[in-house]
Image (spheres, grey):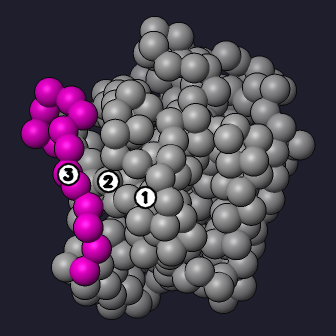
Amino acid sequence: MTRKTFKMLSIPEESECSSEYVFLNYTQDELDDAYNQLRYAREAASVGDLYNSLSIRTRSSNNFSSHSYGASADETLDYFHSETADSNPIFIFIHGGEWRLGTKEMYSFLAPAFLDAGIDFVSLDFSLIPSVRIPEMSSQIHEAVRWIYNHSRELGGNPDQIVIGGHSSGAHLAAVLAVSDWTGYSVPQDVVKGALCLSGVYDLYPVILSYRKGFVSLSTEEVLSYSPIRHISPERKGGFIVSHGTRETPEFQRQSAAFAAMLGAGARDLVVMEDRDHFEVLLELANSQSVLFQKVISLVTDIKTRYQ
């Protein structure tokens, strides 16, 4: 998978780091903590339970269809269609979980707010670490978008109005897709019209210096290739919403701010949610009255007007 490359950054040589600090002003223990959400979100388990209970309720009361988009058993999606209209904009959600945890079913609770707003909602499953690595994961999600583009009309969606969003490691994958070169996938280069990047990481270099190097296996070339902050096209004009909470780890906050700054005019909004941790921010996306959700609706509305 190739991407147009602009504003290329370099990975620091080992000699540029002091013996005490492994990245910026972090010691190894501090960097590990800065990539460990459980150090900062003490109620993560209870919030996860809430995800599950809300999703069970959603799946029992909303019509959706499940589809296979690839060859493996992991490559499936749930398509929720808004009955308010046909030819609806489509929001594709990529779940997080350190690239190694999570299922599409767990995040069904996000669907109702989108459906009420006349937006079709898609939740993806894909293979996870250790069965695949990030490059294969990215390839699968590219195939999911292609499948949705080719089949969404029969499901009630508009393939010319696709917005992709993700949370945590899913935000990283959403950003990878949003800056991708789609040559070879038989879809338009602008198949992804907009992106929500919620509480993600966009430069993998510090990630592989942290404890996550124990399960994230990437070559130096792959670190560069799959760090979306290093592949930002100047043609992007307002297609991104970047967001994080104020009670997230310092690195997730720093990465979000750095990605928005590098996007420049391409960062439509940087939404900072006060007093929300890494897991609570996702509840804001499920709340139709929240600032975050209203920003997403504004983006989708603009895309719908432009590509109707």
What residue do we see at 67% from left, 16% from top? 4
C-alpha span from label 2 to label 3: 6 Å
**Residue type highlighted by circle 1:** Phe
Q: Are marks 2 and 1 in contact (CB under 8 Å)?
A: yes
Q: Quick check: is 242 in the magenta stretch?
A: no
Looking at the image, residue 150 lies above or below residue 46? above
**Residue type highlighted by circle 3:** Ser
Q: Which element type, helix, strand or loop, lies under badge 2? A: strand
Mark 1 or mark 3: whose residue is earlier in sequence = 3
Residue 66 has which mark? 3
Q: Find residue 120 and report its horizontal and vertical position in percent.
A: 45, 57
Residue 15 has which mark? none
Query: Is 37 positioned to the left or the right of 27 in the image?
Result: left
Mark 1, residue position: 121
C-alpha span from label 1 to label 3: 12 Å
Q: Quick check: is 72 in the magenta stretch?
A: yes
Q: Nearer the viewer, residue 101 or 177?
A: 177
Query: Is 224 positioned to the left or the right of 57 in the image?
Result: right
Q: Residues within 10 Å of mark 1 (few under 14, many from 20)?
A: many
Q: Which stretch appears magenta? A: 61-74
Q: Are marks 1 and 3 in contact (CB under 8 Å)?
A: no
Q: Find residue 86 and report its horizontal and vertical position in percent.
A: 47, 53
Q: Which element type, helix, strand or loop, lies under badge 1? A: strand
Mark 2 or mark 3: whose residue is earlier in sequence = 3
**Residue type highlighted by circle 2:** Tyr
Q: Which element type, helix, strand or loop, lies under badge 3? A: strand
Mark 2, residue position: 79
Mark 2 or mark 1: whose residue is earlier in sequence = 2
Q: Quadrant of residue 135?
A: top left
What residue do we see at 59% from left, 80% from top? 288
Q: Quadrant of residue 162?
A: top right
C-alpha span from label 2 to label 1: 6 Å
